[in-house]
Amino acid sequence: MASSSSGNSVPAAEAVQVLVSSLADDSPIVREASMAALKDITSLNPLLVLDCCLTVSRGGRRRFGNIAGLFQVMSVAIQALDKGDIDPNYLAKLAKIATSEVISTKELNADWQRAAAGVLVSIGSHMPDLMMEEIFLHLSGSNSALPAMVQILADFASSDALQFTPHLKGVLAQVVPILGNVRDIHRPIFANAFKYWCQSCWQCSIDFPLSSVLDADIMSFLNSAFELLLRVWAISRDLKVRLSSVEALGQMVGLITRTQLKAALPRLIPTILELYKRDHDVAFVATCSLHNVLNASLLSESGPPLLDLEDLTVILSTLLPVVCRSNDKKEHSDFSVGLKTYNEVQHCFLTIGLVYPEDLFVFLLNKCKLKEEPQAVGALCVLKHLLPRLSEAWHNKRPLLIEVVKLLLDELNLGVCKALAELIVVMASHCYLVGPSGELFIEYLVRHSAMFGLHRDDTERSRELNSSNDGYYPFVYKKTETKMEVGTLSELRAICETGLLLITVTVPEMEHVLWPFLLKMIIPRVYTGAVATVCKCISELCRRRSSQSGAGVLECKARADIPHPEELFARLVVLLHNPLAREQLATQILTVSPVYLRL
């Protein structure tokens, strides 16, 4: 075939041929270096690279030791072709070579087979009709290569939705009639394909009306496939089949008719909720599908919600423990999955909250009152997430939330304490903390900022602190009574310290609550561990209120419960005996000392 029209200087054909041959070298280092060099050369002259690859590809993987690497290079080169370089006959020849390798075995997902599929997908990006014609030759119920062909179509839909979607009707016409005969081992492949095919429709709907993408024939095919996946595949004993089917159903719920969706919900929702008994990976997939189901059922513009509160109660009760587990999963291998699951669950609650804001609010408060760890922690996390997003709908519910939070202030469970501290910070940023109740919540953050960690020395100091009569400290160190799997004392302390500083620096409306109340936190011995943080906050408040220093002094004198300047100064001088204390205590005390001298 003719050389590329590119004007750049290119390596000689002999040099490229040597690099292609080196793809089959015994050394992995040589293979990787050759592949990297060839991929770079494709940007200069993709046709030269393709010609050299075509030469050694004759005979397939039995003649060439690294056919997977060869196909990967060919795929990159095809993608790099300019419009002027595209020759249908040449691409058809490449498609035949790739297809012949795919259908030469009953294996699935071998490296070389996936690489050959990549060649076909790359050809489809230039000439989708040619690629589809080649695939359809092998897309029949009696063909052993059928699963591999379906996987290629799924890959094509995932990589180029706009090119694939016009061919969706033809694909469904070939695939849907044979779904009933698909073996269990191949069902995940077909379900995964339906997921990507539906996603391609959603992607096209961004630029075109969905009605122009889905005609009556496509809707009929999708409805038939939906019923089969829901009634047969989604209840399979094989977890992979169930999981892939639920994932596909989650993408299909927004495309099927509203009548069919309403009839499917009593069966579909329990099927999804059943998956939450599994691990994090399964929970994430289930939550993504559940989110799509909730969106299609509750937020559709074509009619009222298809689920009432009674239907949603089971969903809410199932999701709350998932929030708790996902929020506190710290193993590195699962943390990213747990975080994604946590975010997806919060999206589910938001979807429900947009339709039933008051009912959801009451449900969450009732779960908080139970003080059962998974339910209470989950409810507090959801309240923290939804408070900024449903602030208008929940505006009149502020007193109820404040009263429930007050009931939890003496809770000793560390998981509840962590979630409660985070919620208090969010409440402060939305002006929930006012008056005496506001001071009560600030005292909660200060008290837990004073907590020591679980190191041996800190444990002894904590015991001494509790044995004194100078103040009340509710967290007596008893390892057998503290539920450490939810979080450590040091994590709770860090949350409260950071929360206090954030409130002071970023929420101007909190100044009237913090000043002069924070001065009360200096004297009691129980708050000693938080003095450095309190001093930081006081310094920031005084910096912002420097032009109103006279008003600040008057506020202090107007309150009988604020310590005298002499008491504050004496207390800070005593604390200076340990200049190397954590959080640079001495530095913070010296920074804030001029404030007390002006009082």
Image (tube, rainbow, N blue to C red):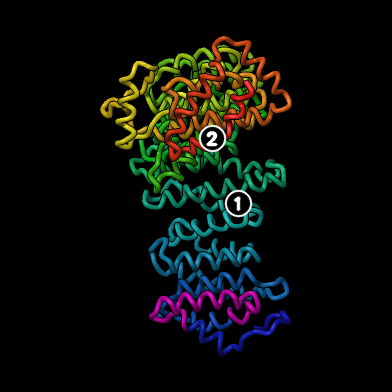
Q: Report whether residue 314 is seen.
A: yes
The relative height of residue 171 versus residue 364 in the rendered view (above or below) is below
The relative height of residue 35 versus residue 186 in the rendered view (above or below) is below
**Over which residues does the magenta segment extend?**
22-49
Using the rendered view, name the quadrant where residue 354 is placed.
top right
- The quarter of the rendered structure image containing the N terminus is bottom right
Q: Nearer the viewer, residue 1 or 281?
A: 281
Give the SS element for disc 1: helix
Q: Is residue 221 left or right of residue 471?
A: right
Disc 2 designates what residue? 588
Disc 1 designates what residue? 168
- Residue 17: x %, y % from top left: 53, 86
Residue 24 painted magenta? yes
Q: Amino acid at mark 2?
A: Gln
Ranked by sequence position, the earlier of labels 1 and 2 is 1
* Separation (CA) of disc 1 from disc 2: 67 Å
Mark 2 residue crowding within 10 angstroms, few (<14) / some (14–19) / many (20+): some
